[in-house]
Image (spheres, rainbow, N blue to C red):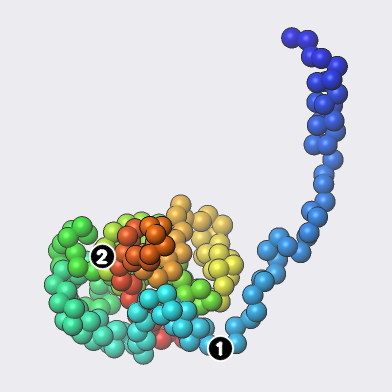
Amino acid sequence: MKVSPAKENILKKIRQALSQSTPIPFPHSEGNHSVFQPATQDPEIEFAEQFTKLQGKFIFCVDHRELAAQLKGLAAHNGWKKLYCREEKLKETLKTNSFDGFSKVELKDCDAAVTTCELLVARTGSIVMSAAQDSGRTVSVYAPVHICVAYTDQLVYDIRDGLIALKEKYQGQLPSLITFATGPSRTADIEKTLVVGVHGPKEVYLFLVDRH
């Protein structure tokens, strides 16, 4: 097939352009530096403030014994009889501290589901989860209430810090799914009216356990 002189000229220019590297016009805007100011308070306080602003419910625990007691009281207060958890290590930790309230129930039938997480992002009040966790992809999404157990040494300031920490943890082989959950599921697509619990849990609880 014969190429016209005009088309050949265009192709020649494209080849020449591709053979020459173009410098980045704004090299300092490529995520090397955070656009946000450094934290001015403890990450625990920063996270709690941001998380509760987004309708999350925050509970601080000094140890696993208090975690078990607080979780038992929360379940009793809300009348939750069907608590779901598939993380054996977490269940064993809670059982050791006198909480054995999990039922042999399917995720679709539970009142609330309990998981751990990868990290917490203080600046945005976000819970970071991944497909590499024992709870998998579905537990925190399909349960009507999500209860997350996290630790103070899992706090990072910003999303960038969290991604760096995950790259180090998984040695560059990141999980197939990383989720940043920021409060209960919400949408305002219909007449700009905020509705909670449409595409995920309607309530999110975060139990932060001290572990420095």
Q: The N terminus appears in which quarter of the rendering?
A: top right
SS class, disc 2: loop
Q: Which residue is mark 1?
A: 41
Asked if the residue under mark 1 is in contact with the one under mark 2, i.e. CB atoms within 8 Å, the reply is no
> At 48% across and 87% down in the image, what residue appears?
45
Q: Is 8 rendered above or below residue 129? A: above
Q: Which mark is residue 103?
A: none
Residue at point 42% right, 66% down? 181
Hey, what amino acid is under mark 1?
Gln
Q: Where residue 62 sits in the image (x, y, percent)?
A: 36, 90
Amino acid, disc 2: Pro
Whether residue 174 is visible: yes
On the image, numbered disc 2 is attached to which residue? 144
Q: Nearer the viewer, residue 90 or 14?
A: 14
Residue 118 visible in the displayed image: no
Task: State the SS at label 1.
Answer: loop
Q: Residue 56: x, y in percent?
A: 37, 76
Left or right of 146 on screen, residue 17: right
Query: Residue 21, located in which quarter of the rendered image?
Result: top right
| Position in image of residue 72 (x %, y %) | 20, 82
